[in-house]
Image (cartoon, coloured by chain):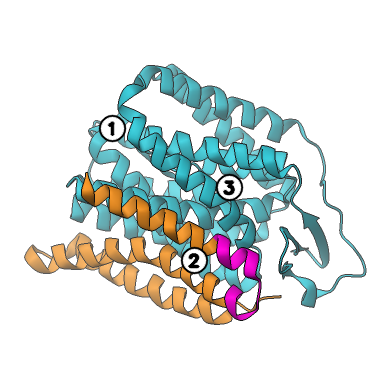
């Protein structure tokens, strides 16, 4: 792939990945492989794009206080541990079986996200801008929706942690970030508003990507000039994605997320 | 509620430096380009770890003990992952 096309692909996938909290690697890696790049060199570039998108989104998401760090840290312990186990046993799972499994998970997540109508968490008129952010000591918080403020609290924690563990396991097995499982799990299982779920997932996929990049660096699989180009484009794409996330209404973000997941699911199953 | 103003500014500086290093890595020839690109990758790896460390310190300072311990546990998981990577 020529540098201009690589930069454009990294920009686009980082923007979409940050907007929906998907991470971007699940989109960029298949594009690179389809263009003729070897998978062992495409996977590290996917994680560079994820890490760049996560860093680009951080300043604005922190200022908007839309990330729930307590939820992110609590779930990332399970996800990172499972990712480590997945990476250690990845040699024992057939790639074709893994692709079908990933595709089915993506389609199920797309179905549950797409079929839901309206907004689950409703605004509370008694809340003000001062209340926006995380509630200390809990997995709850308040986020701004236009001129109103919406309270939320994580539900079905054991099931949610199971989903996050599965996201980590998939991430470790396949070498792509698990954001595309984490965001639907937080939104549809734990009833976290989709914008908070996406922003929190964007934070946690940065942590997962850091571990993955360490692995690839130790294996000598990172081509520095390509990685730098993907990082530069990913930083710009991530900045654009987080601005769009701030502007777009939650149902539109959720439907866009479902559509993207459906495309990913079909691609994974067809390309196995 | 936590004030993430300081962390936001630190990560904004990291973002600008990473972008400059990434451009250097992509377009500078020779050793300068390799060093610049490597610096970019190191910052991308370090930034989320720094963020979790900052959260642990903040939660310890505000006596949110449960989540400070969870943050420490995550740092232990990350350190263990790093150790396994380099020992294999």
Residue B57's label in the rendered image is: none
Where, by quadrant of the figure, is residue A258 drawn? top right
- The span shown in magenta is B59-70
Residue at position x 59%, y 26% in the image: A107
Marks 2 and 1 sit apart, C-alpha to C-alpha, by: 36 Å
Give the dominant element type of the magenta stretch: helix, strand or loop: helix
* Camera sees residue A4: no
Element type where label 1 sits in the image = loop
* Chain colored orange: B
How crowded is the residue under tag 1: few (<14 C-alpha within 10 Å), some, or many (20+)? few
Q: Is residue B67 magenta?
A: yes
Query: In front: mark 2 or mark 1?
Result: 2
Q: Pointer 1: what residue?
A: A35
The image position of residue A41, as x and y in percent, is: 23, 40
Position of A94 with respect to A62 (left or right) is left
Whether A119 is drawn above or below A101: the answer is below
């Amino acid at each position: 792939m020529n540098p201009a096309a690589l930069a454009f692909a990294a920009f686009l996938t980082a923007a979409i990945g940050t907007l929906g909290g998907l991470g971007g690697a699940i989109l960029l890696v298949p594009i690179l492989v389809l263009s003729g790049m070897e998978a062992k060199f495409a996977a590290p570039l996917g994680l560079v794009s994820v890490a760049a998108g996560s860093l680009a989104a951080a300043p604005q998401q922190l200022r908007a206080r839309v990330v729930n760090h307590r939820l992110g840290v609590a779930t990332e312990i399970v996800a990172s541990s499972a990712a480590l186990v997945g990476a250690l046993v990845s040699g024992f799972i057939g790639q074709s079986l893994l692709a079908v499994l990933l595709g089915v998970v993506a389609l199920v997540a797309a179905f549950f996200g797409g079929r839901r109508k309206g907004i689950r968490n409703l605004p509370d008129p008694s809340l003000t801008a001062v209340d926006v952010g995380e509630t200390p000591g809990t997995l709850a918080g308040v986020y701004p929706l236009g001129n109103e403020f919406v309270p939320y609290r994580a539900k079905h924690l054991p099931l949610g942690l199971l989903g996050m563990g599965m996201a980590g396991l998939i991430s470790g097995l396949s070498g792509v970030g698990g954001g595309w499982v984490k965001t639907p799990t937080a939104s549809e299982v734990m009833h976290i508003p989709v914008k908070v779920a996406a922003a929190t997932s964007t934070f946690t996929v940065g942590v997962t990507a850091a571990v993955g990049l360490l692995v690839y660096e130790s294996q000598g699989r990172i081509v520095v000039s390509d990685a730098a180009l993907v990082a530069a484009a990913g930083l710009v794409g991530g900045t654009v994605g987080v601005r769009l996330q701030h502007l777009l209404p939650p149902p539109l973000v959720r439907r866009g997320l479902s559509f993207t997941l459906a495309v990913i699911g079909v691609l994974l199953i067809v390309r196995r | 509620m936590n004030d993430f103003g300081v962390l936001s500014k630190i990560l904004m500086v990291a973002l600008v430096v990473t972008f400059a290093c990434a451009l250097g890595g992509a377009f500078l020839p020779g050793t300068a380009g390799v060093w610049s690109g490597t610096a970019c990758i190191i910052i991308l790896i370090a930034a989320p770890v720094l963020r979790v460390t900052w959260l642990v310190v903040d939660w310890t300072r505000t006596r949110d003990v449960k989540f400070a311990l969870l943050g420490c546990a995550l740092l232990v998981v990350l350190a263990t992952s790093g150790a396994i990577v380099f020992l294999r």
